[in-house]
Image (cartoon, helix red, strand yellow):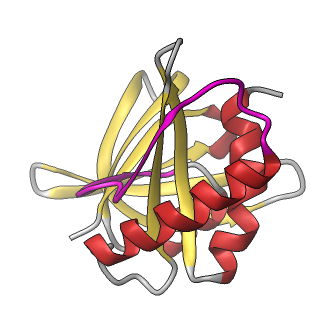
Amino acid sequence: MKLEEKILSIIDPPMNYRGYEIVQVRVIGGKCPVIAIDLDRLDGSPVLMDDCENANRLISAILDVEDFINGSYNLEVSSPGENRPLRKISEFERFCGRDAKVETRVVVNGRRKFRGKLVRVEQNSQDAVVYLKEECNTESIEVGVLHSNIKKAVVKRF
């Protein structure tokens, strides 16, 4: 298990309990790495400085107790910003109606990059299809992309 995945698995449940969602965990650098954590509020409100400070204290305490990171590190907790990454199906569902950019791993309809409004997510037994409505000149085109084929997706939060 990668270090980012281990950190996420340990801090995600207590942060969810307190009304936060861990958007991503990055470990940057080697000797004294920076552990950069982006979090969002589950209630949809903007992430404030107080949220970051409170989350930083809690995450720091959890990582100190678990003590699986060798050596010292710097912890940075912040908002994901205006362009929030989307990964989980539940995140795509939550942000339906918002403008999004999606990049796929494979070519879909002759392209790999799409920009439009998230309109819906349909789940089937193996995967989910994320639908975007693109505005092209005077017409709207709806494009469906398998969730498993999405390489990168971001949504405008505000």
Name, please, the residue furthest toward the left.
Answer: 137
Q: Residue at x 20, y 57 (%)?
A: 139
Q: Nearer the viewer, residue 44 or 147?
A: 44
Q: Residue at x 78, y 54 (%)?
A: 65
Residue 128 shows up from this direction: no
Q: Residue at x 61, y 82 (%)?
A: 18
Residue 16 shows up from this direction: yes
Counting the numbered discs, the total is 0
Image quadrant occupied by the C terminus: bottom left
Q: Read off the magenta span.
A: 67-86
| Magenta-span inclusion, residue 85 | yes
Name, please, the residue furthest toward the top.
Answer: 31
Q: Nearer the viewer, residue 86 or 62?
A: 62
Q: Position of residue 104 (x, y in %)?
A: 50, 29
Above or below, 40 relative to 130? below
By secondary structure, the bulk of the magenta-drawn segment is best described as loop
Image position of 68 (left or right of 103): right
Q: Position of residue 48 (x, y in %)?
A: 28, 75
Image position of 52 (left or right of 13): left
